[in-house]
Image (cartoon, helix red, strand yellow):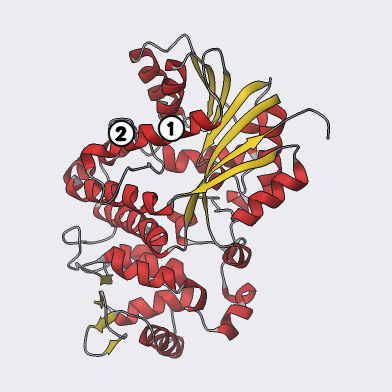
Amino acid sequence: MTTVEPRCSTDGPVGAVDPARWPDVAAPPASSPLRTAVTAAVVRRALERLPLRVRFAGGGTAGAGGPLLEVHDPRRFHGRIGAHGLIGFGESYMAGEWDAPDLVGVLTVLAAHAADLVPAPLQRMRGLWAQRQPAAQRNTPEGSRTNISRHYDLSNDLFGVFLDDTLTYSSAVFRGFPADQDLLAAAQHRKIDRLLDLAGVAEGTRLLEIGTGWGELAIRAAARGARVTSLTLSREQRALALERARAAGAADRVDVALCDYREARGTYDAVVSVEMIEAVGAEFWPVYFRTLDERLAPGGRAALQAITMPHDRMLASRDTHTWIQKYVFPGGLLPSVEAVAETVRDHTRLTVARRDAFGAHYAETLRLWRERFTERADDVAALGFDATFRRLWTFYLAYSEAGFRSGYLDVQQYLFTKEDSAR
């Protein structure tokens, strides 16, 4: 098993990659010289059309001008992409085989051209070369517990490093741009208040929250006089959310249950779910929306915040295993606006009463998280997370920000109403 030689990176020297922790990063996939050469030709042809400057170690450039992408190890860079596509591209960054002074800028260009990076003939044969999602990551009740734990149970302290004091891990809503770190907590409260207003949460409201986070929405709803039942699959989140509810004097109005959404019972005046659907998986979207329907009393209102992607790209990639799924959100899949509308129409008695998009706000939210994560890299290291993990999360935050800056991703706030109980 080989290790990666030290490289210059945005997080200091990468050093040797731990093969036990990061086996597919430490050991590049085997690739024949012919396959690597063919991949290099395909990659360079794709890059030539893009507003990038690509510089390869040992000589050679590509791109039409723009942010710099510097490839330190072209052989391994092309070998990984040839073997594993975009997963290989991300793993190559984790290994320190390429860098970019403006990582978000480079990834924004790539996201803007995501639909045509792969030549059309290869796109048509996607089913033959693209990795399939592992069966083990299906979001069954047991699978969901494992998938959620792999991300949200990493460490509450890790998330505390880069989130604001509200510990809100979803898009904020700002008054204007550019946003400031000091205004992030207020922007998160603005987002939460908009959702609670959409759902009509007030004194005496029986509120179901699907996806607790670290409890800020539940606490804020309780301050309005609501009685909140909040569901999470993360033990670490539940413990801290209950602690925060007690500290806020809301323990008697907030119940946080370690419970899958499919196990929820009872009816509620309002249901709120913030960026939870992304962890559900297409297979279970009908079940998720039926749960909103079944738990919502007639005349009730449900507010949902969801990250969305273009419908055609969702259809093309829904069965593909991605870098994000492998390293960040196992089992995750972003829906499209069309998929949400179709699922609600075909499987529930709910009506889409309102939809507001605000993707630019998510780009700013992610920028602030990324900057804080970078500034506090030593704190992340002190928690026991190695340099490869820090590069992974730097890439994840930049990759996500680029998706919103390019317009490839968007985020929506939905209002669903349920006027009566008859189908």
- Where is residue 140 shown, x and y percent of the image? 65, 42
Question: Within 10 Å of the Cα at label 2, are there few (<14), some (14-19), or many (20+) other Cα atoms?
Answer: some
Residue type of the residue flagged with mark 1 = Ile
Residue holding disc 2: 186
Q: x, y percentage for residue 407?
A: 44, 62
Answer above or below: position of 374 versus 74: above
Circle 1 sits in a helix, a strand or a loop, which is it? helix
Whether residue 41 can be seen here: yes
Q: Position of residue 148 (x, y in %)?
A: 50, 40
Query: For residue 327, which numbered disc appears in the image?
Result: none
Q: Is residue 139 above or below residue 89?
A: above
Please state which amino acid type lies under the numbered disc 2. Answer: Ala
- Which comes before the other along the chain, label 1 or label 2? 2
Could you tell me how far apart the alpha carbons at marks 1 and 2 are, in whole angstroms?
10 Å
Give left or right: position of 27 versus 57.
right
Would you say residue 95 is visible in this rendering? no
Q: Residues within 10 Å of mark 1 (few under 14, many from 20)?
A: many
- Up the image or down, 264 lies above or below 253; here it is below
